[in-house]
Image (tube, helix red, strand yellow):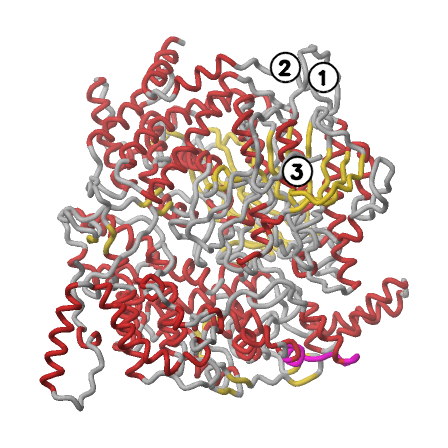
Amino acid sequence: MRAFPETCEGHWPVISSKRGSGIATAFAVAFTLVTTANAENSAVTEYHAVVSPILEQRCYGCHGDGYDKGKLAFDTLDTDAKILDPELWLKVLNNTRAGLMPAERKPKPSVAEQQKLERWIKYSVFKIDPRNPDPGRVTVRRLNRVEYRNTIRDLLGVDYNTEHEFPPDDSGFGFDNIGDALTMSPMLMEKYVAAGQAVIAEAVPTAPTKPAEQIVSGLAFQGTNAREKWGKRQLQFHEPASVATTLKVDATGTYRVKLNFSVDGNYFPDPGKARIVARIDGKEFLNQEFAYHDDKAFTFESTHKWAPSEHAITIELTPLVPPAKKETIIDLFVKDVTIEGPLEQSQWVKTKDHDKYFPRAIPQDRKQRRAYAAELLGAFAQKAYRRPLDDETGQRLATLAESTYRQPGKTFEQGVAHAMAAVLASPRFLFRLEAPAAHAVNVQVAEVDEYSLASRLSYFLWSTMPDDELLGLAARGELRRNLSQQVQRMLADPRAESLANNFTGQWLQARDAEGIATNPREILVRDAGEESSMRALREAWKRQDEPTAKKLAQFLDNLVKSKPEFDNDLRKAMRRETEMYFAHIVREDRPVTELIDSNYTFVNEELAKFYGIPDVTGEQMRKVTLPPGSPRGGVLTQGTALLVTSNPDRTSPVKRGLFVLANFLGTPPPPPPANVPALEASEADFHGREPTLREVLKLHREAPLCSSCHSRMDPIGLAFENFNGLGMWRDSERKQPIQAQGSLITGESFNSVGELKRILANDHRQDFYSTFTRKLLTYAIGRGPEYYDVETIDVIVKRLNDNQGRFSALLMGVIDSAPFQKMRVQATATVSN
Amino acid sequence: MSKNLSIAAERYASLSRRHFFRGLGACIALPALASLTPRAAFARAGKAPTRMAFVYVPNGAIPAAWWPAGDGGTDFALSPTLAPLEKVRNQLQIISGLQDLSADPGPDGAGDHARAGGTFLTGVRIKKTAGSDIHAGISIDQVVANQIGHLTRFASLELTCDAVRKSGDCDSGYACAYEYNMAWRSPNQPLAPEHNPRFVFERLFGAGAPRDRVANLKRRQQEQQSILDYVLADARTVNSQLDGRDKQKLDQYLTSVREIERRIENSERIPVKNPSIDAPAGVPDSYAEHVALMFDMLLLAFQTDATRVSTLILSREGSNRSFADIDIAAGHHDLTHHKNSPEIIEKVKLIDRWYVQRLAGFLEKMDQTEDVDGQSLLQHSMILYGSGNADGNRHTHDNLPIVVAGSGNGTFKPGQYVKAKPAPITNLFLSMADGMGAKGVESHGDSTGRFA
């Protein structure tokens, strides 16, 4: 028997107040008895009494009395099941809230009517109990690539590049941390086993002593044309460079010197080549030609017998492409020089980290050894599994270690290391297993235990395992009591960057900024209205008319070169801009509407030039206040959003409109029907003239089948037409001035992208709050929102409204919500240790 | 030595599932083995095994340039797109009329790319979902692998040339899994393919220098085995607390572990044929090289009988790749929606042909590689190349562009342009499965019988 919701008033039938209050009271009492007796019946009764009259008045014009637009007619709901179908009413709720229904400027329900409708939907159809909302079911979540990499980094201090080693994760609802969407396959399992072994091999020393090691940073190299980029020593393939540094050794012995560098080109194919020569004390140990590589690492070594002394190491770069052909942009990044030695065993030093993993002397006695192994492995597994360990597992780990180290030629350390690798392949490490709190008995919904909460928090805010402080609080049962302080601490921690990078990377597609295909040349030529020249150039090539071709090519080259260059560094800066912007809003607790509109952004010199913002120098990204009247401000007008919503050769107002509708307003139109003609086909209707995109789209929308969705998307997307397919501002397209005005389907008109942003941030604030909440909630709980989450979302939106829309309200709203704090309990509620 | 045996004995005793595998091992006759040096003397030990591979290209092909002229038969001229296959022409079947109607929109609306990818080898309607509950069907390569997979070290091999995956949604409300995976072990478990040629090589043959490789592989497998024993026990402690979809996820984990164990078991029975070449360095910078290298890995896997079943995705359905080496900067998918612009159609034809050129390189090598009995590897194989989309512009799924290369050890009589009556491509798959020696496969997906 579900608890009766507190908002009883809404469920009472509408009784004319003209009748005597006595009769009304009697009626009300009788009604209460009926309601208490049978919840379902009362929902249906209420439908007929309260909801249906509203529908008759507002909706039957299209959805009743013989009309069934969109195949919906309310008066054909003839069974209880149909009347109480949650999926139907979810659509009604969303559409009426967004103002999309009633359609076409028909009168909307009054505020009171809408409230009645919503209350009935939420509490009678969805059966939400506001005091005990359903937290829903999250399928057990496997660590995704990012989470695995971060967890390994925090557990063992090793950086394992999962982007290279693991296949990409499947995503759902736009995110790659959705439990249901993440799968396991034999190949992936093999990779996990191999990864565990590789990581342990790097982190855990298997011998107590080894040769000493020195690392000399790449930045120590100084000399001609020694540059620095992204914090690393950089040499460029198109300019000769000669750098050197000194290596110093303090003892006599044999030394192995390794030079580590990487070669990274910006464009493929790039004809650049250079000869790299490296010498120690004037003697060459590397002399080779290098060409284009995509961030590839190289190591070259040489061995020497030295007494305590100093030695010069030099790197010389000679370009093999004449400077006149400066197109080549290939960088050499000197990572470091590692000096291992003396290699003679008598001079070996204590292995780094040996004490860290094996703090005591290793016992000789077999039983004591095993006990020591069990102790070490128990502590490790506890951290790796993110909760206390049972004895049985500890013993199994000790057995595994023992069976390894008792093999001939194996050391104790190797045995323990092998067992640690096994821990990393276990489902208890790879999956985030959760359990209800210990006191949860005989309930269907319970709080998750504090260890589960610690993991939920750390993977949400940091995309990694909980740290010692979180686990310590969980062990003492004090995490919930200190929840808001912990959240504050976590947001201030550098690991909180993960929230910005991974959430924004997917919600706003910032991850795609660097990889998405684009053709700057075609875009700029179109802006200048010189596509006819481009066509003429192709014709000239076909005819092999060299002089004409050269002239046209020169003309187009000059056109392109007059604009800022669009390269990988710029794209990286664009991605960083979006990530830092979001991180700023999180850390400074700004109102979330600043995501839509603001007077600041984050740029470096290159990006500032691209945007036309003056007085910014240096490659560091920093916050700048935008000049007054600047159209930038808010993520929608940042390079990232504009780039990922364009085609390789032009803008796509449809994609941009869809981006705003889906990610900010929460009302994406359904997908297009099959066989939609390409946009360019409509250009033929302009009889030889080259039309602007706005003109072409208008023609396109004239078919009624198309206009129902495109009148929602196109006006929004067209407002951004002043930003070309690279995100650069332009005043004209194809030699015609760009017009940005339009109106939304909900009626508001705007004359510029700035006005549109203000409308979105003000008139559609509730839609934005609701959409943003849904996205963040999905990311936090690892499942898509269901109909019964509506109440949770509404509560968070209210919290935002009550707190000037500050991000902390949203964040704590999500963290305090039932889906985040609780879980559905299985029939046999066994509490795992 | 004895120490190792006792450890092995402990291992064998601890878990009962072993008995199943040991029993199986005893009943199967080992296939004929020969050294890899070409032109060595071969023992006449019976027929060479049959191999099966599916190679996928996205976005269909321009029909006018794909289909040869005429009514079919052995006397036909290769079309412009297929012209690069001239040298292996007598090993080809160009088959028209094949359909993948499960990829049609029906009640689901847009999403032809996800559907074309997800239904190609499964032949069932896939569930339209962007996240939870992906549901396709078992793919034909896995149906065959389930039956004959125990004869080789790897039951099947899944390969791809897509290194990067798009973030967020994929095609009109369909999850990305439908486009990036070709092989499905079960309706909700796609088999993720490997994109790095070096990893493929090392999985097949071991890491390190050629002479150390096999020993390295054995050692690695022994270490793997003890880890797997441990994690299975861990999984048992977890299993009792889960139900519903959670249990399904853990089942995926357990199946994956057992698959690796099975492979290790097979390795202990079936020796590794070690190629004397160096492993590839990694993922090449150019796409053309990447494709060529993956084809090389496939050939090597077949030649050394490491597996007999494979799938290779050259690029996922819906791919928007650009092709720098033929001077095409726009995206493949964007271009295929040409709406009859002749200039754009020419570009798409170039891309279609570019892919066929990669295939030609592979088939020529297969044709020149000697198998155990002196015949060519290609004669013993069935390589199906094609797409789940026919006309990429209109998203049609009938008259798919399909080429089958190889005789499959007598399953087919190639060297023909087969103008078949419209039939589901799954019918052809059934005939291929027969050729692989699979038994009792009555139907697959939307099949209506064997391919005539």
Kindly identify which residue carries mark 1: B373
Q: Quick one: label 3, few (<14), some, or many (20+) residues within 10 Å?
A: many
Mark 3 secondary-structure assignment: helix
Between the residue at mark 3 and the residue at mark 1, the CA separation in whole angstroms equals 26 Å
Q: Amino acid at mark 2?
A: Ala
Q: Which residues are magenta?
A: A687-698
**Which tag, 2 or 3, sits closer to the chain's start?**
2
- Which sits in the foreground, B7 or B452? B452
Kindly identify which residue carries mark 3: B293
Query: For this view, does A826 lie left or right of residue A534?
Result: left
Chain under disc 1: B
Q: Amino acid at mark 3?
A: Leu
Q: Residue at x 66, y 74 (%)?
A: A563
Specify whether residue A598 is in view: no
Chain under disc 2: B
Q: Quick one: label 2, few (<14), some, or many (20+) residues within 10 Å?
A: some
Q: Residue furthest bottom?
A: A18
Q: Are marks 1 and 2 on the same chain?
A: yes
Residue A600 lies within the magenta run = no
